[in-house]
Amino acid sequence: MKRIDIYYGGQHYSVSGREYEDVRQEILGGLASGQAWLRVNIGEGQDVPSDLLISPGVAISLVPIAAT
């Protein structure tokens, strides 16, 4: 897998170097705990680390992007 695109709060973020299912399970674990931070990247070209607050009621989408 090349990366995982994440859509959160109307913005586009990404995660690389991780498996889709691991990120999904981390999000589910954070929801089960009430809230958690998820480390992602934002930016084009040079990624800038960012943290998203995962909590109930906040829409988040994961899109696996396969390596070509």
Image: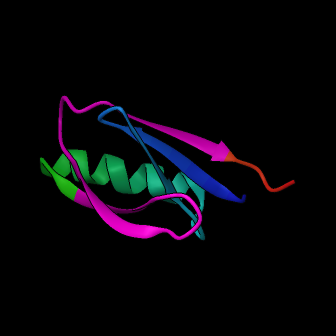
Please tell me whether residue 44 belongs to the stretch shown in magenta.
yes
Horizontal side of residue 67 vs 2, given as left or right: right
Q: What is the total number of numbered labels drawn onto the structure image?
A: 0
- The colour scheme of the drawn protein is rainbow
Question: Could you say which quadrant of the image residue 7 lies in?
Answer: top left
- Residue numbers of the magenta segment: 37-64
**How far across and down, in percent of the image, does residue 63 sit?**
58, 40
Residue farthest toward the left in the current orientation of the protein: 34
With respect to residue 60, does 66 lie above or below? below
In reply to whether residue 27 is colored magenta, the answer given is no
Closer to the camera in the image, 46 or 37: 46
Give the residue at the far front of this rendering: 45
Quarter containing the N terminus: bottom right
Q: Nearer the viewer, residue 21 or 64?
A: 64
Q: Looking at the picture, does residue 56 appear above or below residue 53?
A: above
Residue at (58%, 52%) from the top-left corner? 4
Quadrant of the rendered structure where residue 60 is? top left
Q: Main secondary structure of the magenta part?
A: strand
Query: In the image, is residue 9 above or below residue 27?
Result: above
Q: Position of residue 35 (x, y in %)?
A: 15, 51
User: Based on the displayed image, in which of its 4 quarters is residue 44 positioned?
Assistant: bottom right
- For residue 6, above or below residue 67: above
| Rendered residue at 80%/56% (across/down) | 67
Residue 40 in the image: state x and y as whole percent: 40, 61
Left or right position of 8 against 18: left
Q: Give the side of residue 46 with respect to residue 55, left or right.
A: right
Query: Who's the residue at 47% across and 44% down the image?
Result: 6
Q: Quadrant of the C terminus?
A: bottom right
Lateral position of residue 68 relative to residue 13, left or right? right
Point 46% across, 56% down: residue: 23
